[in-house]
Amino acid sequence: MFGWFNSKQVEEVAVEPKIEWVDESPKQVYDYFNDSTGIHFDHKKEIVTAKLIRFAKEHGSHSFSHLLFRLKSDSVLLQHLINYLTVNETYFFREMDQINYMTSDIQKTSKPIRILCAPGSTGEEAYSIAIALSEAGVNMGRISIVSIDINTDAIACAQEALYSKRSLHRADEIIIERYFTLLEDKYQLKDFICRYAEFKALNLFGSDLMTLGRFDYIFSRNMLIYFDEIKTAAAISRLISLVETSSSILFFGHADIITAPIGLKEHYEKRTKFFTKG
Ligand SMILES: C[S@@+](CC[C@H](N)C(=O)[O-])C[C@H]1O[C@@H](n2cnc3c(N)ncnc32)[C@H](O)[C@@H]1O
């Protein structure tokens, strides 16, 4: 009898609360999200609206205006939504031409070098840079790599440095053997290389961006594709404020459309496009 009573209670607890959804335009939520993060969803509004409704209901909201009211006053809820909606796709050794270009540039000097990945998602980019520099025989003692991302779950994954085979599909077996330890079906990056990259949960548009200091090389790859023209320009000007000198280099992703890059000078060397402050 008690068994029946308990399982019935569990069933009752598991039932999702029925929320009567008030139908209204999601525009203000989109605008607020765009303003906070830079991301817009103009090309996939239907899918994202369905996701937003689901998110709102799961968090006890019955309308977009109620969700918006709560997002404005609850930074934890806003962070949940950011983690839910950002696309963190990345993998090791992506767009290596730029990393190789930087590596040969760094080999020409012996000065301390600061590198920024903004954004770095789950860490593959920052660690690929560390591995490439280490493989090239660069003295790693003079290298500092900082990787930021707005998604706190992505930052936690980067710090854990435990990757799937899919994430390593571009990696040679010899590199996997040298830098990773196989743990069941996952690959743990070894400590001796992990320690060259530092990860911070940070919004490119946040007021704490300048606490990062300045950098000799900035990678900002495959984030601007999610921004509109206005936010792309704003992001570029934030990135420019982080360069160390007028010869510091900025790399963008191949898919990032950098039209009329105000404040940037374009270069093309060794089949690699990059920018300096201009
Ligand atoms: C597709 S990933 C690119 C990762 C890596 N740079 C690459 O090219 O493989 C895009 C990342 O941008 C991050 N992002 C989006 N808006 C951001 C913002 N305002 N500040 C910091 N990171 C942001 C997302 O969380 C996501 O992890």
Image (cartoon, rainbow, N blue to C red):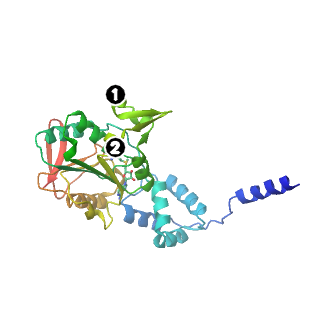
Task: Decide if residue 45 is in sight here.
Answer: no
Q: Dot 2 lies on which element? A: helix
Question: Looking at this view, is 139 or 91 the one in front?
Answer: 139
Circle 2: residue type: Cys
Question: Looking at this view, is 203 or 259 the one in front?
Answer: 203
In the picture shown, does residue 240 fall above or below 69?
above
Mark 2 surroundings within 10 Å by alpha-carbon count, few (fewer than 14), some (14 through 19), many (20 or more): many
**270 displayed left or right of 231:** left
Rendering coords of residue 241 (x, y %): 20, 61
Disc sitting over residue 87 in the figure: none
Identified at 55% across, 59% down, the residue is 55
Rendering coords of residue 187 (x, y %): 43, 35
Circle 1: residue type: Asp
Judging by the rendered image, the residue that carries numbered circle 2 is 194
Q: Earlier in the sequence, mark 1 or mark 2?
A: 1
Split into 4 quadrants, where in the image is the C terminus? bottom left
Tag 1 and tag 2, C-beta contact below 8 Å: no
- Quadrant for residue 150, please give it: bottom left
Mark 1 surroundings within 10 Å by alpha-carbon count, few (fewer than 14), some (14 through 19), many (20 or more): few
Identified at 52% across, 57% down, the residue is 49
**187 displayed left or right of 178:** right
Rendering coords of residue 207 (x, y %): 31, 68
In the picture as drawn, the residue positioned furthest to the right comes out as: 1
Judging by the rendered image, the residue that carries numbered circle 1 is 172
